[in-house]
Image (cartoon, rainbow, N blue to C red):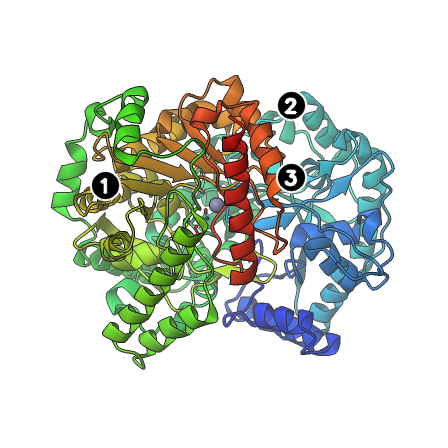
Amino acid sequence: MTKIHILGYPRIGAQRELKFALEAYWANKITKQELSEVGSQLRQDNWKNQDQAGLTWVTVGDFAWYDHVLNTSLLVGNTPSRHAAIEDPLERMFAIARGVSSSCCAAGASDMTKWFNTNYHYIVPELSNATEFELQWTQLFDEIEEAQSLGYQVKPVLLGPLSYLYLAKSNDGVNPIDLLAKLAPVYRQIFEKLEALGIEWLQIDEPIASLELEQPWKEAFASFYSQSPATLKLLFTTYFEGIENNIEWIKSLLIDGLHLDLVSNPKQLDSIVEQLPEQWILSAGIINGRNVWKNNLNNSLQLLNHTYEKLKQRLWIGSSCSLLHSPVDLDQESQLDRDVRDTFSFAKQKLNELALLASGLQNIGDSRDQILKQSTALLALRSKRAAINPRVRERSAKLDQHSAQRPESYAKRHAIQQQALNLPLLPTTTIGSFPQTPDIRNARQQWKRGDLSQDGYQDQMEQHIKEVIAFQEEIGLDVLVHGEAERNDMVEYFAQHLQGLAITQYAWVQSYGSRCVKPAIVVGDIYRDKDLSVYWSRYAQSLSTKPVKGMLTGPITMLAWTFPRDDLAAKEVATQFALAISDEVEALQNAGIQIIQVDEPALRELLPLRRSKQDHYLNWAVTAFRLSVAQARSETQIHTHMCYSEFNEIIESIAALDADVITIEASRSKMDILNAFEDFNYPNSIGPGVYDIHSPSVPQANAMSELIEQASRYIPLERLWINPDCGLKTRAWPETKSALKHMVDAAISVRQQQ
Ligand code: GLN
Ligand code: ZN
C-alpha cells in the first residue's frame, strides 16, 4: 500500500479550543490540569481524524502549547538563563514566550519572528558560547506513548538540528554552526529514545535545506547526517521551496527518505527522481498545506503517475508542509455560499484528498473514476462562479509603465504640498488607529447580530470619531486621523467591502501562541463597486480644519494577509487590489481629503525565500503600491506605514515606493534603523516612531526629544515627522493620552531649539 501522511495538523482546534484554554489558564481561571486535558483532547481528535481518513501513521510532535520551535528548545534543554529560576517546564516555556514581570523572577520574553514566508511566528532560540544542550524534556515521548496507547501507528516529527541552529540567534556572536558538536549528541539520544519506543520512521524537518546555503552549512549537514541511527529511519523533510539546487549535497546524506514540497515547486520532481538514491523513499508533498482550496486530484494524479510507475512503494503521498497553516474544518462554515464552499478544503478535508489520491495512484476500486468526477465537478463549479470579471481583466491588461507614475517628482510635490498644508517643522501625527474600546467592539457585535440598527451603529462610530478628533485637536497634533473605530481589522474591513473575497466564520489559523488570524479568501477578480472608507474620512474631516489622513490598506498587505487564489498569479491579484485601492484614493481626494495613508506592513513578508527570485517580486510589489496611489494629485500627500522591517536589503524598493512620507517602527532600535535610509540617501520624508506602542508604559517627553535628536543625525529635520511606532488599537485611553501629549511636547521643544 502507498504510504500516506501529513507533516503536521493544526493544533488550535476547530473552535480555537487551545486559544481559549491558554488564555483562561494565563488569567488563572483554569488549572494546569484542565489546560492539560484540553491539549490531550485536541491531540486525540487530531489523531482520530488522521486515522479515520486512512493515513498510514498519525503524526505526533506537532502539538505545542505555544510553538514547536520553542518545544525543540525545551527538548534539547536550551532555555535562556534568565528564565532558569522557573522550575516548572510549562511555566518556564510560557515565560520564554511571553516574558514574566513578577518581582521574584522578572525576565523578558525571547524574540519572536516569522516562520519562513508564512504568517506563523516562532520563538527564536537563543545561543551563546556558554550554551550547553541536554535532553531534559519528555513531552515528545509522552505524546508518542499517549498515541501508541490509543492504538495508533506513530510517525513523530522533530525540527532537525541544522534548521534549529540556523533559526536561532546568537547573543554573543557565537557562530551557531560551532554549537553543532554539542547539539548532535542530544539528537542522537533522542533517536535512541525513539527506537526504544518502537518508532520506525522519524520525520526530521530541515526546511533550511531549500535555501541558498553557505558552504559551512552544507558541511554541517554532511557532518550530522553522516551517521545513521541504529534502526530508526529518517525522513528528511523540506518545504516552502524546492531543493533542486541542493540535491547534489543532500544526495550524499545518510538518510532514508526525502520529502519534497511539490506545491511551492512542482518542477523539481523529475530531476530529483532521476537522482534519488536507490534505497531512499520519496515523499511527494502534493496537497497544499497552506491554502484553502480543493486539490484538482486529477492533475495531481497525472503529475505523480509517472513517478509512481517508477518508484511504486517507494513513493509516499503527503501534504506539502504542515497543515498548521490551513484552517481546521470546512464543515463548520454554514454561512458560505454553497458554490464557493464546495471549492474549499480545510485541514480535515485535505486528509481525505490524500487518501483518495493514494488509491487513485494504485488504481484501487473505482478511485480513478471518483477522482475524475470530483475534478470535473470542481472545474465546473469554478467556472460557474464567474471568478473572472472581464472589465477587471481588461483594465489590468491596459496598464503600462506610466500607470504607476505620479505626475511630479517628490521634490516638486513636496513644495506643492507644503503650500497646501502649511505644516510646521517636525509635523506630529499618529499611525491611524486609536484604542478599540469594549464599547466599540460591543457596538459592532450588536450590529452584526442585528441588535443594533445600521443607523445606531453609525451614530456610535461617529461619536467615537468625534471624541478622537476632539482629543487630537486638544493636544495639538498637526495631522489627525479618524481612529479606525469602524474597523475590526485593517484587512478584513476592506475584504468585506470589496468584491471578489469571501469571509469565513471559523477559518482561523495560528499566528503565534494563542493568537489566531482569520484571513479572508480571494475567490474571484477584485474590484471596488462602492466607497470603502470615504464616509468616515469625510465625516472626520468635517470636524476639523486640520488635515485628517485617509487610511487605507495597501495592495501587498491585502494580498499577504488573505488566502490567495490558486488559479491566478499573485502579481495579478496584487494589481487588482491596487486598482481597487486607487479608485478609493481618487474618491477620497475628491471628498476633500488632502493626506492619504496606504499601509504596507506586509511588504517584506512575501519576499521569496530564494534570493534569485526576490528582485522579481520586489519589482511587481513596488509597482502595485505605486499603482494604488498614482491617481493622487501632486498636492495630495501620500503616506505609507510599514511597522518593523529589516530595511537594509530592501531599501532600494522602499525608496521606489516614492511615498511622500513613510512611517516606521524605530524606537526600540533607538533610531539605528535609520542607518539604512541614510546610507541609501533616502530622499523622501520619514516618521521614525518615537515611542513603543507595544507596552502600556508612558514615555517621558525628554526621552522622545532625545530620540528626535538622534533621528536628526540620520535624516535632516526638514524631512522628519514625529509619530508613535504603530497604531494605538491595542492600547487603553489613559496611557494613550499621556503618551501622545508627551510626544507633542517633545516635538515642540525640539522645534523651539531651531
Ligand atoms: N493604520 C493601522 C493602524 O494604525 C496600521 C496597522 C499596522 O501597521 N499593522 O492600526
Ligand atoms: Zn505598524
Q: CA distance from mark 3 to mark 2?
A: 28 Å
Front-most of 451 and 538? 538
**Looking at the rendering, which quadrant does residue 188 occupy?**
top right
Residue 211 visible here: no
x, y percentage for residue 223? 77, 30
In this view, 751 is above or below 41: above
In the image, what residue occupies the spot 20% across and 35% down? 631
Q: Which mark is residue 214?
A: 2
Q: CA distance from mark 2 to mark 1?
A: 42 Å
**Looking at the rendering, which quadrant does residue 169 occupy?**
top right
Neighbor class of circle 1 (other Cα within 10 Å; few <14, some 14-19, many 20+) is: many
Front: mark 2 or 1 = 1
Q: CA distance from mark 1 to mark 3?
A: 56 Å
In the image, what residue occupies the spot 16% across and 44% down? 590
In the image, what residue occupies the spot 12% across and 45% down? 390
In this view, 595 is above or below 472: above
Determine if the C-beta at disc 2 is less than 8 A from ligand 2: no
> Of helix, strand and loop, which one carries label 1?
helix
Q: Which mark is residue 279?
A: 3
Residue designated by label 1? 582
> Of helix, strand and loop, which one carries label 3?
loop
Q: Tell me which numbered mark, 1 or 3, is placed earlier along the sequence.
A: 3
In the image, what residue occupies the spot 72% across and 65% down? 143
Q: Which mark is residue 404?
A: none
Direction from residue 134 to residue 447 in the image, left or right: left
Residue 360 visible here: yes
x, y percentage for residue 593? 24, 44
Neighbor class of circle 3 (other Cα within 10 Å; few <14, some 14-19, many 20+) is: few
Front-most of 191 and 163? 163
x, y percentage for residue 280? 63, 40
Neighbor class of circle 2 (other Cα within 10 Å; few <14, some 14-19, many 20+) is: few
Front: mark 1 or 3 = 1
